[in-house]
Amino acid sequence: MVLHPLIVSIVLALLASAGLAGAVLRDPVVASVLVALAVLVALSVRVGKQWQKAVVLRLGKFHGLKGPGMFFVLPLFDTITMWVDLRTVATPFNAEQTLTKDTVPMDVDAVLFWRVVDPAKAALELEYYRDAIFWAAQTALREVIGKTDLAEMLSGRDKVDDLLRGIIDGRTEPWGIQVVAVEIRDVKIPQGLQDAMSMQAQADKEGQARIILAHSEQKIAEMFAESSQSYVNNPTALHLRAMNVLLEGMRHNATVVVVPSSVVDMMGNSGAELLRKVVPNKGTL
């Protein structure tokens, strides 16, 4: 690890004082003591950051954890073998061409959020704990995909995330590592299957639209049947309605208006005379 600027400054100051003592005071003993002190400071004083823990071995055996801040080690006896980062780390991992429970191949990308809660275990139980976490997460993801249907992978991601977090945390807990969260970023399925699912969804939407249209037509027919009851015993109202329908049709600039003779007879003499007056202005009766 690179020495802290404060330690470097102290060492340089001691070396400068040793040179000054040798040159001005001509006292080699003082100069030697200052040089030895500078070397001792460089070898024994360390500074750890707020999120760091130093794993210290003394004569090859675990001695303890040091830091954060300034601390001292015994030169030649103590060795700092690892600096453990205690912050939460995001590790991306994936599973390619993995079959689901219903034998659908898919590619899944996910992110694992974890942090070290016991630096001693993480340093002593594993050689490279970051690699171990990655492989444990990828293996757990493949295992979960194999036990999950395609529909659940696509729509139930929260449930799959919680299941993954529990499996991975169970494997990493003996290593002094806690899994904070697991999030599935993307699920990719073959293009042919995507097209088939799109066609199925479109067919379902069209079926629902036809059902809604059929219900609407049924309601309209019921309303027409209910409205027709008002004309049964009222011929005058029926005549007026028929005349209104004809006049509405004439407003669309039709050149020819065909009216069945039965309709004209139903309107009576007054209705027929009115049609003869109106129709010549619009077309032919």
Image (spheres, rainbow, N blue to C red):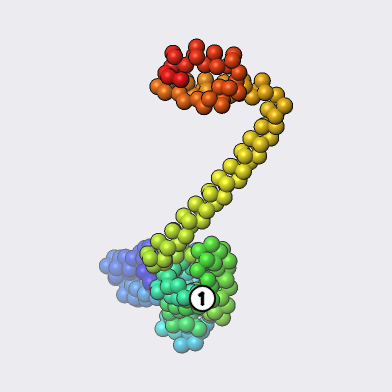
- In the picture of the structure, the residue carrying the numbered disc 1 is 101
Q: Is residue 97 left or right of residue 149?
A: left
* Residue 279 sits above or below residue 141 on the image: above
Residue 247 visible within the image: yes
Foreground residue among 183 and 274 = 274
Front-most of 143 and 19? 143
Q: Give x and y (percent) for residue 22.
A: 29, 70
In the figure, 97 relative to 272: above or below? Answer: below
Residue 241 percent coordinates (x, y): 61, 23
Q: Residue furthest top?
A: 277
Residue 162 falls left or right of residue 256: right
Residue for point 47% across, 16% down? 279
Residue 121 screen position, x and y as percent? 53, 80
Q: Residue at x 57, y 71 (%)?
A: 163
Three-letter residue code for mark 1: Lys
**Where residue 13 appears, x then y in whole percent?**
35, 64
Q: Please indicate, yes or no, whether residue 48 appears anywhere in the rendered image.
A: no
Q: Residue at x 53, y 49 (%)?
A: 210
Q: Secondary structure at mark 1?
A: loop
Query: As drawn, is 270 to the left or to the right of 128?
Result: right
Counting other residues with Cα less than 10 Å from the Cα at mark 1, is it few (<14), some (14-19), or many (20 or more)? some
- Residue at 41% over, 66% down: 193
